[in-house]
Amino acid sequence: MTAAPTTSIPRVGLKNGETIPQLGFGVYQVVPADTRRSTLAALEVGYRHMHASGWVKTIGVSNFQPHHLQRLLDETGTVPAVNQIEVHPYLTQDDVRAFNTQHGIVTEAWSPIAQGKVLGDPVITAIAARLGRSVAQVTLRWHLQRGDIVFPKSVTRSRVEENFALFDFELTTDDLAAITALNRNERTGPDPDEFNWIP
């Protein structure tokens, strides 16, 4: 491993004992026209330096499509550990998931129940009724059986408990196919190619 550079960025201690650089290279709420330029500059000035010095063990990305990932691979040689993308039965993102798998990148699904839109879906409701499970449980189990990491959001204790009761049942191959067939390429969040999420 390369020795740490002599010009050091101050570090901040975290509760778990780890430390992180006090200076980051984020682009949150950057004007969309400046996002590309700012990101490239941050990669060139900061990330590559920190990666080469051994400070960065691994990275994760969010909302990267295959062309974004390919560019990251081509320009930096870095393969992210995780790609957090919007995935649910109405947006299966099979092309992104396949690219992730091909490159050893784990898919993490955000908005796994499409902000509640799938809760009334008749196909998933029928499967849930047959299994004696909730629609949310069936949907989350679908994610797990496809190999995705999933973090359902809930602040209600009973729902959190329900969300963890996913490991004592399985969906059949037909169930998985029926849920996957619900794909409409319908996003509940921003399109990563348009940066249309910045206020």
Image (tube, rainbow, N blue to C red):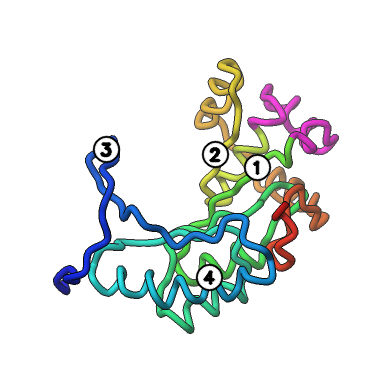
Sequence-wise first label, 4 or 3:
3
Q: Are marks 2 and 1 in contact (CB under 8 Å)?
A: yes
The answer to which quarter of the image holds residue 95 is: bottom right
Badge 3 or badge 1: first in the primary sequence: 3
At a point 14% along the width and 71% down the height, the residue shown is 3
Residue behind mark 1:
112
Q: Secondary structure at mark 2?
A: loop
Residue 39: mark: 4
Label 4 CA crowd tier, 10 Å (few <14, some 14–19, many 20+): some
Tell me if residue 125 comes above or below residue 42 in the rendering.
above
Disc 3 versus disc 1: nearer the observer: 3
Q: Amino acid at mark 2?
A: Phe
* Figure check: 119 above or below 111: above
Q: How many numbered callouts?
A: 4
Report crowding for label 1: few under 14, some 14 to 19, many 20 or more residues within 10 A (C-alpha): many
> Gap between marks 2 and 4, in whole Å?
27 Å
Asked if labels 1 and 4 touch by Cβ distance under 8 angstroms, the answer is: no
Label of residue 151 in the image: 2
Residue beneath the point at 47% across and 78% down = 73
Q: Give the percent coordinates (x, y) of residue 34.
A: 63, 71
Q: Which residues are magenta?
A: 116-137
Q: Amino acid at mark 4?
A: Thr
Q: Residue flagged by tag 3: what amino acid is it?
A: Asn
